[in-house]
Structures are given as structure tokens and as C-alpha cells.
């Protein structure tokens, strides 16, 4: 079976975590919720359902959840002109694929958002497959996304590495028995990422690319 490199997109390949924080804050404010921005940022990387539990509490009235999530989608779309790929993101994907890995984007984004992010990333020649919102029943930190990406790659957990930027990425990978390489570009600290189970932690994908020869991603 092939070895698979499973890449989170938001916060790992694209600099979007703080844009999502802003969009969620504005969406929540429309419905009278004003939690601290830091609490919202600490929930980025979760699926919307888990994020609202984390930010507002799981004993809340859930009647507005769908409307809040829809508002976030609209507000995030307005920020598309601000989307930027991290320097070296596309080159990292190409180098990893050239070394023999199957490259799968592991995202739970909507088809619309994922299409936009892939255009910004501009690395279609290095991507073998991708997951999206329709591929998962439960969002991170549940392991469903990692398992869906494994299925796309046709790989077993022991043959894969997940690359992400949040505690929820690391937790989902660990629960799937997949090794995890983390980057700090999403705003989560190294100590917390390592404590969650990250095998390696790098400043960003540029640093990971520079250290590829000594990384678990150096060879399949």
C-alpha cells in the first residue's frame, strides 16, 4: 500500500485561522454572543458544531446553531480576497510527492470554500486527492476526517503522516493511530501540540520544507 501525507489546509497550508476567528466572532455577535476572541481562536480547527460547544457551552440553546454557522460561511466568503498560502506551501507538497508520498488534502471545508483555497494554494500538480465536508459525519477532534483521508489515499494508519496546526488536528490524528507533524502557523503553542501527541513541531511549512531530510516526511 502507498504511504500517505495527509495535509490539513486551514492554518497549515493557508493563513486562514485568524480570518476564521474574525468571521466566527462577527457571526456570533449577530446573535448576541460576544465571547473573547482568544476563546474563539482556541476553538479554530474544530468543526462548527464542536466549536460552538467549546465557545458557548454544551448546555446552550442550540436553536440558533445552524444560523450562526451559515452566517460564518457568508462572512468568511467575504474574506476570500485576503486568503494567502504560506510561503513554501506548494513547494512542500511537490517535494513530499516527489519523495514518493501520496498527497491528500484533509479538510472538512465546504466544496465551495475548498475550491477557493485550492486555487489560492496553486499546487494541483502535487495533490492526489482531497476530502471535504461531505466525507465526514463527525468533525475534528473526532477521527473521521483523518480516516476519510486515509481511505482517499488507500493507506493504512501506520503508513501515513498527518500535518496540521491545531490541538484538534493532533488529537484527531492520534485517535486514528496516525503520526502527526505540527506547525505553529495556526497560533497554537509548541508545548501544547507536543503534549497532545505531535511527533515533530516546526515554525511553519517553510521550516518543515527546509528540514525535510530529517523529518518523518523525509522518506515514505
Image (spheres, rainbow, N blue to C red):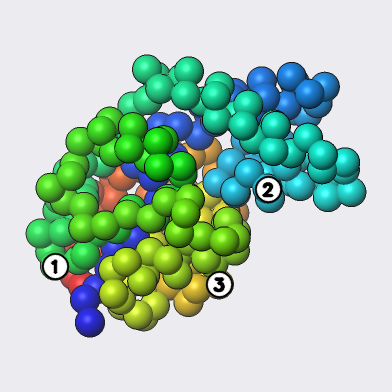
Residue at the spot of label 3 = 175
User: Does residue 62 sit above or below 76 in this rendering?
Assistant: below
Q: Quadrant of the C terminus?
A: bottom left
**Residue 138 screen position, x and y as percent:** 60, 60
N-terminal label among 2 and 1? 2
Q: Look at mark 1 in the image and give the residue it sits on.
A: 100
Numbered tag placed on residue 49 in the rendering: 2
The answer to which image quadrant residue 214 occupies is bottom left
Q: Which residue shows up at 55% across the image and 46% down it?
A: 45
Residue visible at 34% across and 60% down in the picture? 6
Tell me the quarter of the image containing the N terminus: bottom left
Residue 134 x, y percent position in the rendering: 47, 54
Q: Which mark is residue 182?
A: none
Identify the residue at image location x=26%, y=57%. Answer: 129
Residue 212 showing in the rendered view:
no
| Separation (CA) of disc 3 from disc 1 | 25 Å
Q: Is residue 147 visible?
A: yes
Question: Is the residue marked by circle 1 packed among few (<14), some (14-19), or many (20+) residues within 10 Å?
Answer: some
**Disc 3 + disc 1, Cβ < 8 Å:** no
Mark 2 surroundings within 10 Å by alpha-carbon count, few (fewer than 14), some (14 through 19), many (20 or more)? some
User: Disc 3 or 1, which lies upstream in sequence?
Assistant: 1
Residue 7, above or below 120: below
- Image point (28%, 31%), residue name: 120
Q: Secondary structure at mark 1?
A: loop
Tell me: 15 left or right of 2: right
Element assignment for label 2: helix
- Describe residue 191's horizontal placement relative to residue 125 as left or right: right
Q: Give the CA distance from mark 2 to mark 3.
A: 19 Å
Q: Give the image quarter of residue 181.
A: bottom left
Separation of marks 2 and 1 at Cα, in angstroms: 36 Å
Could you classify mark 3 by the number of other residues whose Cα lies within 10 Å: few (under 14), some (14-19), or many (20 or more)? some
Amino acid at each position: 500500500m502507498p504511504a500517505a501525507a495527509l495535509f490539513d489546509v486551514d492554518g497549515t497550508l493557508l493563513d486562514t485561522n485568524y480570518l476564521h476567528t474574525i468571521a466566527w466572532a462577527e457571526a456570533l455577535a449577530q446573535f448576541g454572543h460576544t465571547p473573547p476572541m482568544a476563546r474563539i481562536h482556541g476553538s479554530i480547527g474544530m468543526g462548527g458544531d464542536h466549536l460552538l460547544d467549546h465557545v458557548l457551552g454544551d448546555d446552550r440553546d442550540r436553536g440558533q446553531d445552524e444560523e450562526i454557522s451559515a452566517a460564518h460561511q457568508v462572512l468568511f466568503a467575504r474574506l476570500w480576497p485576503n486568503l494567502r498560502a504560506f510561503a513554501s506551501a506548494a513547494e512542500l507538497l511537490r517535494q513530499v510527492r516527489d519523495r514518493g508520498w501520496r498527497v491528500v488534502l484533509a479538510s472538512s471545508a465546504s466544496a465551495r470554500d475548498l475550491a477557493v483555497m485550492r486555487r489560492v494554494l496553486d499546487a494541483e500538480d502535487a495533490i492526489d486527492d482531497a476530502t471535504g465536508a461531505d466525507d465526514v459525519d463527525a468533525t475534528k477532534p473526532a477521527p473521521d476526517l483523518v480516516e476519510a483521508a486515509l481511505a482517499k489515499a488507500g493507506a493504512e494508519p501506520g503508513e501515513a503522516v498527518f500535518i496540521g496546526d491545531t490541538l484538534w488536528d493532533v488529537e484527531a490524528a492520534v485517535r486514528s493511530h496516525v503520526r502527526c507533524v505540527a506547525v505553529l502557523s495556526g497560533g497554537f503553542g509548541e508545548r501544547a501540540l507536543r503534549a497532545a501527541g505531535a511527533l515533530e513541531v516546526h515554525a511553519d511549512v517553510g521550516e518543515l520544507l527546509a528540514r525535510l531530510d530529517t523529518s518523518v516526511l523525509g522518506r515514505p
